[in-house]
Image: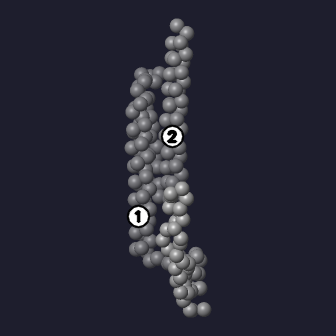
Amino acid sequence: MNTKLQKCQIPLNLVTRNGIVLAFGRRLLHNGPDTIEELLDRHIVKKEKFLDEEEEELQNRRRLTSTRREALSLYRDILRATRVFMWPDSRGVLWRDVLRENARKEFEQARFETDPEIVTRLIIGGREAVKSTIDMLVEKQRQQIEKERSGGDQR
């Protein structure tokens, strides 16, 4: 079973239709593993290596760094998204400032969370909230434009 299969090359014919070249060159007949061991090695899930404490700590730091990066990116996206909320609420405070303050509070509450699953859920929830807020704002602006256009046509 350890005999290696010889790689055969089959020439392809030059096929033209309406002056367009459809195929040209050579292709390999066998481009897979040469032995059963190689086949199994490629397609069977390998057992995880047991890591010593230093390697495990390094992987945890990498994961945390990644989620930190994602959290900072989300925070920046929130700050960018709040730029357009320039009208005041009932107290006279700009919605932009209210939204930024609430975002800051939520990030501070989750600041020391270390469980990767919870952190991921918070980030995904935050992304969805920003997206839905922007979508609602766009829809309201679209409705306002439609209202102004239809009101302008009646005059």
Q: Which of 107 and 8 is in front in this view?
A: 8
Image coloring type: one colour
- The residue that appears at 43% across and 40% down in the rendered structure is 78
Q: Which of 88 and 139 is in front in this view?
A: 139
- Give the farthest residue toward the bottom: 2
- The residue that appears at 39% across and 49% down in the rendered structure is 72
Q: Position of residue 81 (x, y in %)?
A: 43, 37
User: Would you name the residue on which mark 1 appears?
Assistant: 61
- Between label 1 and label 2, give the one nearer the viewer: 2
User: Secondary structure under badge 1?
Assistant: helix
Quadrant of image for the N terminus: bottom right
Going from N to C along the chain, the mark reached first, 1 or 2, is 1
Say which mark, if any, is on residue 10.
none
- Give the farthest residue toward the top: 155
User: Secondary structure under badge 2?
Assistant: helix
Q: Name the amino acid type tagged 2.
A: Lys
Q: Where is residue 65 in the image (x, y as percent from the top left)?
A: 40, 59
Q: Name the amino acid type tagged 1.
A: Arg
Q: Is residue 47 visible?
A: no
Q: Is residue 67 above or below residue 34?
A: above
User: Would you name the residue on which mark 2 appears?
Assistant: 131
